[in-house]
Image: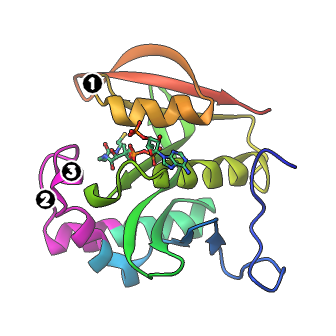
Amino acid sequence: MSRFPRFLGPSGLPEPSGTRLTERLVLKPIGPEYADDLWHLHRDPGVARWYGGTWSRGEAWESALYMERAWAHEGVHKWIAHGRESGELVGRGGLSYAEVDGARRLEIGWAVRERFWGLGYASEIGRAGLALAFGDLGAVEVASFTEIHNLRSRAVMERLGFHYAREFRHRGEPFVLYLFTRP
Ligand SMILES: CC(C)(COP(=O)(O)OP(=O)(O)OC[C@H]1O[C@@H](n2cnc3c(N)ncnc32)[C@H](O)[C@@H]1OP(=O)(O)O)[C@@H](O)C(=O)NCCC(=O)NCCS
């Protein structure tokens, strides 16, 4: 079996319009229709702690609009993640192009509501992102970075098979860079 999942709907056909199905999640490209979900996600204490506090509705809206534009112009950005069965908001994550340690890179990230930590959801989003990167996008490398002391996020990177590259400064703070080269 391939290391990364393929994205097929229940009918066995590819899911339309960028929607991806994983074992337990539905992943959809973020646009303004998910601004409210983003707002809720960034009110979650576990998430807010790592993003400089809660977001206002306006910030969530701006962010959702930005992501919609990035999906349109760059072909990829973050997904919103809901439970396949429950429909509940689980988190967000996936790929985007960003300036990381002095280079423009395809990077991957994740944020999950605290009540869903410890269940493998971030890893599931991460595996979907890597499959997209090395599949449809034809990437040769994916980066991931986080604050040096964000041990939970570093653990996701290591679980997914990223290797530690180096420490670097990001917006004046110490961050770590992990890389995953095309298998
Ligand atoms: C970073 C973050 C997404 C990690 O979430 P997480 O739930 O710890 O990560 P995973 O989804 O990989 O889950 C791993 C845990 O689930 C367990 N697990 C259960 N089922 C699993 C499965 N099917 N697959 C993988 N892990 C599974 C693992 O054993 C591990 O348990 P542990 O925490 O006791 O070691 C989360 O802490 C978060 O949202 N933080 C705030 C936002 C943030 O910091 N984002 C990163 C910014 S760079």
Q: Secondary structure at mark 2?
A: loop
- For disc 2, the neighbor class at 10 Å (few under 14, some 14 to 19, many from 20) is some
Q: Judge the density around disc 3: few (<14), some (14-19), many (≥20) Cα neighbours within 10 Å.
A: some
Q: Which image quadrant for residue 90?
A: bottom left
162 relative to 135, above or below: above
Toward the viewer: 69 or 117?
117
Identity of the amino acid at label 2? Thr
Outermost residue to the right: 1
Q: Residues within 10 Å of mark 1 (few under 14, many from 20)?
A: few
Give how far apart the Cα atoms at labels 2 and 3 are.
10 Å
Q: Residue at x 54, y 77 (%)?
A: 84
- Asked if disc 3 is less than 8 Å from ligand 1, the answer is yes
Say which residue label 2 marks: 54
The residues tagged by marks 2 and 1 sit, at their Cα atoms, a distance apart of 20 Å
**Looking at the picture, which amino acid does disc 1 mark?**
His
126 or 98, which is in the foreground?
Answer: 126
Q: Which residues are magenta?
A: 38-63
Residues under numbered marks 2 and 1 in contact, where contact means CB atoms less than 8 Å apart: no
- Give the x, y percent position of residue 159: 55, 33
Q: Is residue 46 magenta?
A: yes
